[in-house]
Amino acid sequence: MSSELQRTHHCGELTDKDIDQQVTLCGWIHTRRDHGGLIFVDLWDKYGLTQVVLNPQIDQLAHEHAQSIRGNFVIGVIGKVRARPEDMVNPKLKTGKIEVYVDELSILNKSETPPISPWEPQDTSEALRLKYRFLDLRGPELQRNLKIRYDITRTARNELHRNGFMEVETPMLTKSTPEGARDYLVPSRLNPQKFYALPQSPQLFKQILMVSGMDKYFQIVKCFRDEDLRQDRQPEFTQIDVEMSFGNEKILFQMIEEMMAAIYKEVLNEEIKTPFPILKYQDAIDRFGTDKPDMRIEMEIVDLAEIVRGTKFKVFAQVLESGGQIRALNIKNSADSLSRKALDDLTEIAKTYGAKGMAWIKVQENELQSPIIKFFEQEMLDRMLEKLGSKPGDTVVFIADTPKIVADALAHLRLAIAKLLKRVDESKNAFIWVTEFPLVEYDEAEK
């Protein structure tokens, strides 16, 4: 770029305070509109949009030059900031009160018609988006994601530094160590038939640092695990890795809570409540069926095994005889909302997680509706509904099976029901600590 075209401002910062200033802007053509005598261009960079105007009465050469420009061309303009007419003010843009009348136009790079447009809603395949990633990354969602990611790591670094932690980079090429997944291996050129392993975590290195007296270490580090893709699993990921000497659970919890509060305040301008509630692992499984419960959902699992013991309902009786569990969810104000088809769909979800089926009861004002109530005495039904806290208008769903299947099925039913009935406040955050995880778990397949 020549010295005459040295950028003075970004495309998202000019306001009515800059009126009558001579400015230089550079960026990509977002849109171009030819209104006969005037050509309007929305100039884009990562900071925003500025409308620039090419008027032949101001600069004939620039206006003629603008006849050839198209979307995604990279241009530079020199011009004067002017106020937009009142009926053309765009309140959605920071720059919406001004426009730049161009004195000089330079085409820095031409562009062919792109195969995808990241600025317009369109049904584009993921494969095409990845092929043209440099275009896809111009889109507002990915631009925002990258900025949020940067702000998170920046704030985490500042908070950990404030608490006396020092960032230390640990090796990426190391030896294989026992972890929770398979290693990625890298052949060694200097040592034929031998391999480096990419770290699944910096565990050994940070323990060495503690033994060496480093006291407080952190690292925002890449980790690699060769395992199947899932919603919360991918081969390459970044983690905030922390280790400290002579600490305890209370100190660690307080430090992490302060860091999380700072991240939410800095990145999203949201206040989160601290300290976080603490839930033991077994309590989480018993109440929510999972060790990562969504606490925004006001629905808990209730154990009914002792109440229904002695029932004539064979499914429940056989499960109890084999040492299984019978647990349920009470879904408030749902009897009219959950159709028979909706209950059948929920049953299929339960089956996905190993359950053989799902029983249900609708609690109406003067009756109970369900194909299973004929197998229960009224006293047993009354005790069940009392423990569940059921009232007219509620629906109860039951799972009877082994403890693991009951927990998995009800955990996923809880999420599905809350989503179906729109019972999750997406604007709300509800953090908890889950503690006292088991050291090992029984593997049914391996016995």
Image (cartoon, grey):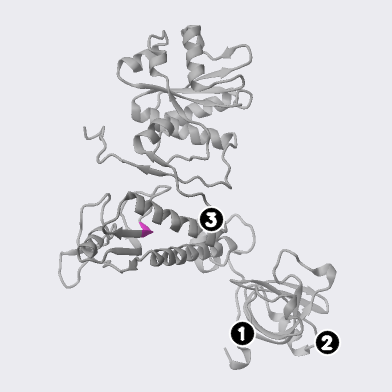
Check disc 2 and report the residue beneath it. Answer: 57
Residue closer to the observer: 9 or 143: 9
Determine whether, in the image, residue 299 is placed left or right of residue 187: right
Check disc 1 and report the residue beneath it. Answer: 7
Marks 2/1: CA distance?
24 Å
Name which residue type carries label 1: Arg
Pick the quarter of the image with the N terminus: bottom right
Check disc 3 and report the residue beneath it. Answer: 125
Name which residue type carries label 2: Gln
Q: Which residues are magenta?
A: 236-240
Question: Residue at the spot x=48%, y=62% of the render?
Answer: 130
At which x and y percent is residue 126?
51, 56
| Secondary structure of residue under mark 1 | loop
Tally of marks: 3
| Secondary structure of residue under mark 2 | loop
Q: Rate crowding at label 3 as few (under 14), some (14 to 19) or many (20 or more) other CA atoms within 10 Å.
A: few
Residue 373 image label:
none
Name which residue type carries label 3: Ser
**Residue 176 in view, yes or no:** yes
Q: Is residue 131 above or below residue 412?
A: below
Residue closer to the observer: 409 or 33: 409
Which quadrant of the structure image shows residue 98? bottom right
Q: Is residue 335 above or below residue 127?
A: above
Q: Rate crowding at label 1 as few (under 14), some (14 to 19) or many (20 or more) other CA atoms within 10 Å.
A: some
Q: Rate crowding at label 2 as few (under 14), some (14 to 19) or many (20 or more) other CA atoms within 10 Å.
A: few
| Secondary structure of residue under mark 3 | loop
First in residue order: circle 3 vs circle 1: 1
